[in-house]
Amino acid sequence: MTTDRAALTALHLLLTWATMTGAAPAVGIAVFLAGWGGGAGAALATAAVGVPLTVGVLVLAGTPARSLVPLCGTARGRFGWAVAVLLLGTLGVPAGAGAYLAGVDLGSADVRVALTGVPYAVAAALFVADRWVRLAAVAVVATGVVYGGVIGR
């Protein structure tokens, strides 16, 4: 990987992380509060607005990665990439919440907020057309599982 591609990869993953560090908690809190105040219907209505908005923001975040991520080469591909990153990254959120509820030390509130975007950045790294980046993403997942399951207790 050339220096330019490495910098672009880092920028792509940082942009995905930053986008989802802001969007995921905002949508989650909005859905929770809507459900608390208006029931399941209000929560579903809020999710029906928040999730597509989040996908749209991810589509925009994937635009600079057109040369790194084959899926991001077209508008339809970026949409598919955004949906896949949202789905895969969201799988990491309950895992983190479960670790937190099980008493695994995840650091201060600031660190926990920063960790919110990590599953999405790891999911985005799985789509980068460089096997070392994908291998690093798998290593991050494995490290998280080991820390949460063995060391963090």
Image: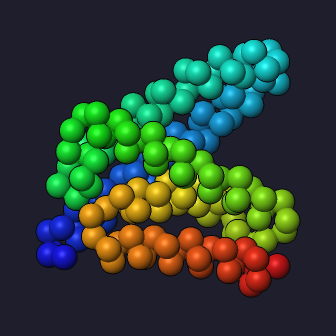
Measuring from the top left, give residue 128's x and y in whole percent: 31, 61
| Residue displayed at 63% across by 21% down | 46
Which residue is situated farthest in the right direction here?
Answer: 102
Measuring from the top left, give residue 147's x and y in whole percent: 69, 79
Q: Nearer the viewer, residue 116 or 56?
A: 56
In which quadrant of the rendered view does residue 44 lie? top right
| Figure check: 38 above or below 77 | above
Relative to residue 135, is residue 61 drawn left or right? Answer: left
Q: Nearer the viewer, residue 88 or 2?
A: 88
Relative to residue 69, is residue 80 drawn left or right? Answer: right
Relative to residue 32, is residue 83 drawn left or right? Answer: left
In which quadrant of the rendered view does residue 74 lie? top left
Q: Is residue 101 visible?
A: yes
| Residue displayed at 76% across by 83% down | 150
Q: Is residue 113 visible?
A: no
| Residue displayed at 49% across by 54% down | 120
| Residue displayed at 74% across by 31% down | 32
Image quarter in which the C terminus is found:
bottom right
| Figure check: 107 above or below 43 | below
Measuring from the top left, give residue 101's x and y in whole percent: 83, 60
The mark total stands at 0
The color scheme shown is rainbow
